[in-house]
Amino acid sequence: MEIIKVTNYEEMSKTAADYIITMVRQFPDATLGLATGGTPVGTYKRLIEDHQDNKTSYKKVTTFNLDEYIGLSGENPQSYRYFMDSVLFNHLDIQKVNTFIPNGTALDLEKECLNYENKLKNHGGIGLQILGIGNNGHIGFNEPGTAFSSNTHIVDLADSTIKANARYFNNIEEVPNQAITMGISTIMQCREILLLASGEAKADAIQQLLGKEVNEHFPASILRSHPNVKVIADEAALSAS
Ligand code: GLP
């Protein structure tokens, strides 16, 4: 695991965006794995600026998102589909049909998980995956205790995750308590991973990521056994390490 220390959120976003842009320019038909949450928003903003200024094209790019809340349709502003469309996809020349996010309102959710996993595999897997990290070490929505062998599956969200994500909703009762997420095994099959972390709130999680034995109680720890992971973290996120 390579640690790239940066000063602040801006520099983290620029470093991550430059990395993605270089990849997309080299491999115009790249498959990217994308994350939601506050962490990657600055990175996405820079991708949009670069697309406008330097014409980096996403016409042939395919994306797979990590997760989606169960029960929220793409028209719901709190859904991850809505989030991705509004913070990124609507501002690039990417073809919407090539942007995949689990469908949290599928009638058969188990089947949706299987389909998502198969779609990803048939597509040849993910070249570069962007990850954030939850305070309890979750990646995607893989909460502590998730089997490292898991594929895309349905999860019950931890109370701490519901609390942490309530800031995006009107009140905590509106936060869904289940989600569909790529599994740990799905994430580990990505050829390259960039994990982003900024701010003091992530300091404990980053300390555990860097210091802890690989252990299912801290899902992100599995990344220590992946051959190609870069952690781009700012000084505050590294302050406990
Ligand atoms: C959510 C997402 C994760 C994300 C995490 C941290 O739970 N499912 O993919 O990494 O939140 O979010 P933030 O970047 O807002 O701290």
Image (cartoon, helix red, strand yellow):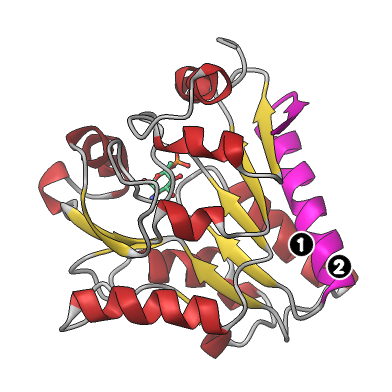
Give the residue displayed 47% in from the left and 82% down from the top: 119
Give the residue displayed 30% in from the left and 41% down from the top: 143
In the shown orientation, is residue 117 left or right of residue 108? right
Category of crowding for the residue at label 2, using alpha-carbon neighbours closer than 10 angstroms: few (below 14), some (14–19), many (at least 20): few
| Residue type marked 2 | Asp
- Asked where in the image residue 58 lies, by quadrant, the reply is bottom right
- Asked where in the image residue 6 lies, by quadrant, the reply is top right
Measured as percent of width and height from the top left, residue 4 is found at 76, 30
- Could you tell me if residue 75 is visible in this image? no
* Residue 208 magenta: no
Q: Are marks 2 and 1 in contact (CB under 8 Å)?
A: yes
Measured as percent of width and height from the top left, residue 240 is found at 55, 10
Q: Is residue 51 above or below residue 184?
A: below
Q: Is residue 62 above or below residue 42?
A: below
The N terminus, quarter of image: top right
In the shown orientation, is residue 46 left or right of residue 174? right
- Inter-mark Cα distance, 2 to 1: 6 Å
* Residue 14 magenta: yes
Residue occupied by mark 1: 49
> Label 1's element?
helix
The range drawn in magenta is: 1-27
- Could you tell me if residue 238 is visible in this image? yes
Give the residue displayed 14% in from the left and 53% down from the top: 174
Residue occupied by mark 2: 53
| Residue type marked 1 | Glu
Q: Is mark 2 within 8 Å of ligand 1?
A: no
> Label 2's element?
helix
Residue 122 versus residue 70: which sits nearer the camera?
A: 122
Measured as percent of width and height from the top left, residue 84 is found at 49, 67
Give the residue displayed 75% in from the left and 81% down from the top: 29
Category of crowding for the residue at label 1, using alpha-carbon neighbours closer than 10 angstroms: few (below 14), some (14–19), many (at least 20): some
